[in-house]
Amino acid sequence: MKDICCIGHITHDRIITPRRTVDMAGGTAFYFAYGINRLPKTVSFELVTKVGDDALGEVGKMRKAGIEVVASHSRKTVCFENKYGENANHRTQRVLAEADGFTLEEVRPLEARVFHLGPLLKGDFPTEVVRTLKAKALVSIDIQGYLREVREKKVVAAEWKEKEAVLRLTDIVKLNQYEMATVSLLTDPRSVARELAGYGIREVLLTFGSEGSLILKDGVFHEIPAYAPRALIDATGCGDTYACGYLYCRMQGMTPLEAGKFAAAMCTRKLEHSGPFAGTLSDIHDIIG
């Protein structure tokens, strides 16, 4: 049994910023797996993904890097185009290809202390899949994919009809300020966090980019600062990096405040270059001080 099992699609991403255009792999699966692979192996980890034949080479690279990967076949590999302006907190997306969703048959054999789900689009994780995982362990979800769908290759906001059912199966939830406005009619972050906790969620993580993050655990709020990067190169995957750092710490018994600061510092180092987190534990602790 692994401590953490991350389930999500590896994507093909085209990242466009005011300074450069980069084609690379991406997705929750990619950023989470490479991020945790850079940290001491005090937490055991497995990645479960689903890709088309064109991405099997990327799976091979991950295995060569020492990441344990279980890969199922999809008719296509999901392909995203992410375009950023001068404000790295804002992006526009297009989807050039969609992957098949995860099935009960693929998740039934899995064993872990916590499953982290990274849906990218509606249909990635049917409710019965989440229910099956919940019966085994804690469930952590970055909800972004539940809140969006593809129309004429554009990513648009979508109604989350299964919201209550999925949230009641969730132990840890992460969302950013834009997703907060989609999932709730409330505007105050603390009120939104309390509303989500009302579904039975144990830990609510709200991230606000350069303005830090807010964690609610057992009725207590923890305000996490954002640490300024030496250079702001690429924000793609920062949310996944935050979840990675947070769960890595929580699985070792660290407090939500300690885990949040670690996750924020890990994001800062990730922001300083394109691609996943490539720093060290010392790099993170140097930021926290």
Image (tube, rainbow, N blue to C red):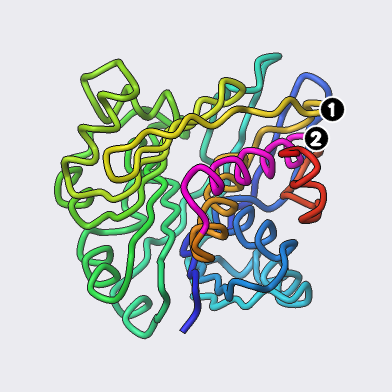
Membership of 204 in magenta stretch: no
Occupied quadrant, residue 267: top right
How many neighbours does mark 2 have within 10 angstroms: few (below 14), some (14-19), or many (20 or more)? some
Occupied quadrant, residue 132: bottom left
Amino acid beneath label 1: Arg
**Of the pair 81 and 192, the residue shown nearer to us:** 192
**Mark 1 and mark 2 residues within 8 Å of each other at the beta carbon:** yes
Membership of 259 in magenta stretch: yes
286, above or below 116, in the image: above
Question: Which is in the foreground here, disc 1 or disc 2?
Answer: 1
The quadrant the C terminus occupies is top right
Q: Residue at x 38, y 52 (%)?
A: 141
Q: Residue at x 22, y 48 (%)?
A: 167
Mark 1 vs 2, N-terminal side: 1
Amino acid beneath label 2: Glu
**Of the pair 23 and 172, the residue shown nearer to us:** 172
Q: Residue at x 49, y 62 (%)?
A: 253
Residue under numbered circle 1: 230
Q: Residue at x 61, y 32 (%)?
A: 82
Left or right: residue 250 compared with residue 12: left
30, above or below 142, in the image: below
Residue under numbered circle 2: 272
**Magenta extent:** 254-272
Left or right: residue 194 compared with residue 260: left
- The label shown at residue 255 is none
Left or right: residue 95 compared with residue 101: right
**Of the pair 67 and 247, the residue shown nearer to us:** 247
